[in-house]
Image (cartoon, grey):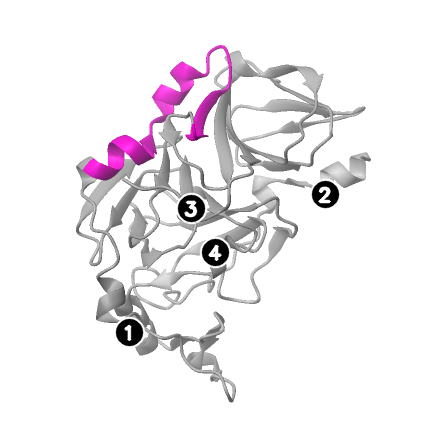
């Protein structure tokens, strides 16, 4: 693989291109300042204008959500895994039919593996612009987002309509549903009864890992975070582990899996074959199978990153309480 090929598989934090109308709540007060980023794969954006940095997917998607203080993402659900780690800021995650069943606050570096089959939302409760990195299961990320009915109703009052094709139409711009295309059906009462109402005490111990704990477990070898024998046991179609200075990959080697590096803190010196570069906080690097690489911190101080690799498990609602 040439240097040009590899550089095309590195997305720098400073070059991320946002979409500000990616979802149905883009005009709803309180949610109208969100930014959505598609880093690896198109994710679940409902806007065809969403810029995708790396189009091909390795069995999962990587995206990001950027929000100013007090901005929230409305209640929704996914059919496959949705994992977040906090890159910047302080965030409150909440869940349930009305967002009142439970909640947890995450700090920088913390990770949450949200169970499928429940509505969830999140908001920036910090004082500065915050950034979440998201991992979605499957090449097509489960076919889109399932919105709580009140989110669809609020959006319609502010000019946004989601078609049954999964595409968003903005009536404020004069757009309307094409002939033969109807609005996305709202969930029936029977369907809503199938969504779980888990408590905080049920969700947090099993689906949240704290940065300080992952750092402690990664002092000699990568800490397994999500996987069948990991801190958060699951089989969502990908595995996540956590590397620190003590578990850096000093000896060049290859892998039979796709792996995506998500830099949390510090600067990391990456070599592949005869080429090299430095990855900084917020950078993403998608390494294909068979590439010989090494990865070590390039400066003193704290250094950490998440590594995501595809697995043979099907992407789907495979985790439960």
How far separated are the C-alphas under marks 3 and 4?
9 Å
Residue 7 vs residue 287, the one in the foreground: 287
* Disc 2: CA contacts within 10 A as few (<14), some (14-19) or many (>=20): few
Q: Are marks 3 and 1 in contact (CB under 8 Å)?
A: no
- Stretch of the chain drawn in magenta: 202-228
Sequence order check, earlier mark of 1 and 4: 4
Tell me the residue that label 1 is attached to. 153
Who's the residue at 57% across and 16% down the image?
A: 248
How far separated are the C-alphas under marks 4 and 2?
26 Å
Of discs 1 and 4, which sits in the foreground?
4
Question: SS class of the residue under badge 4?
Answer: helix
Q: Are marks 3 and 4 in contact (CB under 8 Å)?
A: no
Is residue 99 toward the left or the right of residue 66 in the image? left
* Disc 3: CA contacts within 10 A as few (<14), some (14-19) or many (>=20): many
How far separated are the C-alphas under marks 2 and 1?
41 Å
User: What label does residue 81 carry, if any?
Assistant: 3
Tell me the residue that label 4 is attached to. 142
Who's the residue at 38% across and 78% down the image?
A: 159
Question: SS class of the residue under badge 1?
Answer: helix
The number of numbered discs placed on residues in the rendered structure image is 4
Residue 226 among magenta residues? yes
Sequence order check, earlier mark of 4 and 2: 2
How far separated are the C-alphas under marks 1 and 4?
23 Å
Sequence order check, earlier mark of 3 and 4: 3
């Amino acid at each position: 693989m040439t240097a040009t090929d590899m550089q095309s598989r590195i997305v720098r934090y400073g070059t991320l291109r946002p979409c500000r109308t990616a979802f149905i709540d883009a005009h709803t007060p309180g949610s109208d300042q969100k930014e959505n980023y598609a880093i690896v794969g198109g994710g679940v954006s409902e806007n065809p204008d969403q810029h995708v940095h790396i189009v091909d997917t390795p069995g999962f998607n990587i995206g990001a959500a950027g929000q100013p203080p007090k901005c929230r993402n409305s209640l929704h659900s996914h059919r496959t895994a949705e994992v977040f780690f906090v890159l910047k800021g302080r965030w409150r995650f909440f869940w349930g039919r009305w967002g009142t069943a439970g909640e947890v606050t995450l700090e920088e570096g913390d990770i949450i593996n949200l169970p499928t089959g429940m509505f969830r939302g999140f908001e920036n409760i910090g004082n500065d612009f915050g950034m979440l990195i998201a991992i979605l299961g499957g090449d097509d990320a489960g076919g889109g987002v399932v919105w709580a009915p009140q989110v669809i109703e609020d959006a319609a009052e502010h000019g946004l309509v989601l078609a049954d094709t999964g595409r968003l139409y903005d009536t404020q711009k004069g757009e309307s549903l094409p002939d033969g295309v109807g609005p996305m059906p709202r969930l029936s009462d029977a369907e809503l009864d199938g969504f779980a109402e888990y408590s905080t005490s049920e969700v947090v111990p099993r689906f949240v890992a704290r940065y300080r704990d992952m750092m402690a477990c990664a002092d000699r070898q990568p800490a397994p975070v999500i996987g069948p024998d990991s801190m958060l046991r699951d089989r969502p179609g990908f595995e996540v582990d956590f590397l620190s200075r003590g578990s850096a990959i000093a000896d060049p080697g290859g892998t039979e899996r796709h792996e995506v590096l998500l830099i949390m803190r510090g600067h990391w010196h990456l070599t592949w074959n005869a080429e090299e570069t430095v990855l900084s906080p917020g950078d993403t690097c998608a390494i294909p199978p068979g590439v010989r690489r090494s990865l070590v911190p390039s400066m003193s101080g704290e250094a950490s990153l998440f590594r995501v690799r595809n697995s043979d498990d099907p992407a789907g609602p495979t985790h439960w309480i």
